[in-house]
Image: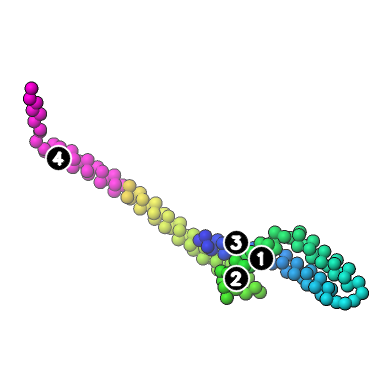
Amino acid sequence: METLDEHIRNSGNYKWYRGNKAQYDKLYAQYETIKNTKRFGAERRAQKALNTANEYYETHRTEIALFESAERYLKDMLQGRFDADKLPPIIKWSAERGKLAAEQKRLNQEYVSLKGEVKEVEKIRRDVDDIIREETRRTRPPRAHDVEL
């Protein structure tokens, strides 16, 4: 379940923050395009575009970092099956986690009931041991306590 939680968390980050990363990539691509042109005033426009891209990046640094981290995690985890154009199977993982949670709850209830039964059996065993000990003490001949003076 912890693995699925990690998958779901990273998939959520990937889904929610990919727009921020796409916007930054778009702004940076505009800068690259302007930088590569050899027109009059291109340097100044390129610097302005770069400043806009950097400002956007600084404003959304955490979201972009979360997206990139989630993307790396999903690429490592899904290996060759990861497609950046598609969203990861969050719904499938959530359903699987739900099944596992239900199974864990069922097993926990079974464990608690078995624990109660074991407690009862142990109590009965102790009572039987006490009864047997009492019976052997009654049927045993009394010991003579001879003391020589």
* Residue kind at label 1, given as amino acid type: Glu
Query: How many discs appear?
Result: 4
Assign a secondary structure to mark 4.
helix
Whichever of callouts 3 and 1 sits on the residue coming sooner in the sequence is 3
Packing grade of label 1 (10 A; few <14, some 14-19, many >=20) is some
Q: Position of residue 114 (x, y in %)?
A: 35, 53
Q: Position of residue 129 (x, y in %)?
A: 22, 43
Kindly identify which residue carries mark 3: 9
Q: Which quadrant of the figure has residue 11?
A: bottom right
* Residue kind at label 4, given as amino acid type: Thr
Q: CA distance from mark 4 to mark 2?
A: 72 Å
Nearer to us of marks 3 and 1 is: 1
Query: Magenta stretch: dominant SS?
Result: helix
Q: Position of residue 56 (x, y in %)?
A: 78, 62
Kindly identify which residue carries mark 1: 68
Nearer to us of marks 1 and 4 is: 1
Q: Which residues are magenta?
A: 120-149
Kindly identify which residue carries mark 2: 75
Whichever of callouts 4 and 2 sits on the residue coming sooner in the sequence is 2
Q: CA distance from mark 3 to mark 1?
A: 13 Å
Q: Position of residue 7 (x, y in %)?
A: 57, 64
Kindly identify which residue carries mark 4: 136
Please state which of residues 104 and 24 is positioned toward the viewer in this rendering. 24
Q: CA distance from mark 1 to mark 2?
A: 10 Å
